[in-house]
Amino acid sequence: MNPLKWFKDSKLHTKILIAMLLGIPLGLILGPKAEYIRPAGVLFIRLIRMIVVPLVFSSLFVGTASLGDIRKLGRIGLKTMGYYLCTTALAITIGLLLANTVGPGRNIDTTTRDGLMTSYSAEAGAKIEVALKKPGVMDTLIDIVPLNPVGSLAEGNLLQIIFFPLIFGIAVTLLPEERSKPLKTFFEAVNEAMIRLVHIVMKIAPLGVLALITSVVGQFGTDILLSLLSYSLVVTAGLFIHMIFVYSTAVRLFSGMKTRDFFRGIRPAQLIAFSTSSSSATLPVTMECAEDNLGVSEEVTSFVLPLGATINMDGTALYQGVAAVFIAQVYGIDLSFGDQITIVLMATLASIGAAGVPGVGIITLAMVLEQIGVPLEGIALILGVDRILDMLRSAVNVTGDASAAVIVASTEGELEKPKNQEADW
Ligand code: ASP
């Protein structure tokens, strides 16, 4: 069989997986030179990010403007927020339980500790500065209402981009039919075109993923991974436990969807989130997977997923629980039960308003550490492996958002038989 033809005929997720597997040896061979391939990956990320704003705006507008019943929107909102908060709190609890039991920071020797602190202190300082400048929870909530909707589109402020089309759409439902129709038709067309664009961009996904994985492997030394092995393993185990147990149980219980169907449907989005380390950039793919492969209605997808990409980060929250305990252990600080509850509350709050972009979790972690009196400079200890863990937690983040979409859709009677089970883009 001709391997090229086989590759061409394979499903998208197979192509992406092959690209990932090829990226590992290529990165190891090229080492720091792999940096030269990175622009191809960055180009891919920019192409999907480019679609986020018009896609979210148009699909939310279309969803709301065609909604007959405003109360339904409120109900969907409450269910979504409730699910997001519960799963986030559960994720941090899993992280805390694992970190306290295994104690990955208890046997880090002082040489490793001092080495890590020196190598990463400058980078840690920069992150801490950003964290300390972050607005408080109240300001974040107030900021959801944009002063200038066009400005928020230009800046790509996702929470504001969710808010405006929602109330714009509601206002349009109150207009007479002859007035609202042209607007709806226009945004429906924009929405359809954006979906087409996602499909077009996904054609080059394997190439983008190959470039991204190669450059990450190329710049990443294995030594650092070894010195932080038990910490990395605890985070990874926690993420798997959360993904396999919490999501499959929730999806099974509330929607009746088979675990296998759920994971198969969301696989392309997981792979893209893993490669790009960004749940916001993956949003167009997550939306497509939810609609085409999982059968979630556009109305639910367009609200639940953009909201999730901004405020629901279970993977990030879990990692923050482990990281906070790990750093405290290395410093020999005993965290009380109260401190651990503070971590749960702070990490849940911190994830709201933090956009799903690479490395944001480490910044919000600094906010958590500040609350429990653990030295902020401690983040230097874990920076070396953050890139790899970021990939994993981003994949969990998008899975969590998709599980919410399935559950909310099912309880609203908006879960249909999927068009495709496994989209072949
Ligand atoms: N990169 C993650 C995301 O986009 C956020 C983080 O944990 O840094 O979901």
Image: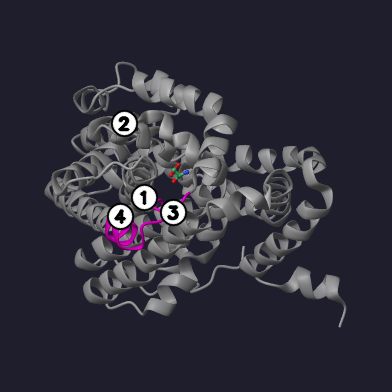
According to the picture, the residue beneath numbered tag 2 turns out to be 367
According to the picture, the residue beneath numbered tag 3 turns out to be 107
Up/down of 262 relative to 87, above or below: below
**In front: mark 1 or mark 3?**
3
Q: Amino acid at mark 3?
A: Asn
Q: Quadrant of ligand 1?
A: top left
Measure how far apart labels 4 and 2 are at the Cα level.
32 Å
* Percent x, y of residue 361: 41, 40
* Percent x, y of residue 334: 25, 45
Q: Point out the stretch of residues depicted in magenta.
A: 94-108
> Tag 4's secondary structure?
helix
**In front: mark 1 or mark 2?**
2
**In front: mark 4 or mark 3?**
3
> Is residue 317 covered in magenta?
no
Classify residue 3 as left or right of residue 220: right
According to the picture, the residue beneath numbered tag 1 turns out to be 305
> Tag 3's secondary structure?
loop
According to the picture, the residue beneath numbered tag 4 turns out to be 300
The image quarter containing residue 398 is bottom left
Count of numbered marks: 4
> Is residue 99 covered in magenta?
yes
Q: How is the image coloured?
A: one colour
Q: Earlier in the sequence, mark 4 or mark 1?
A: 4
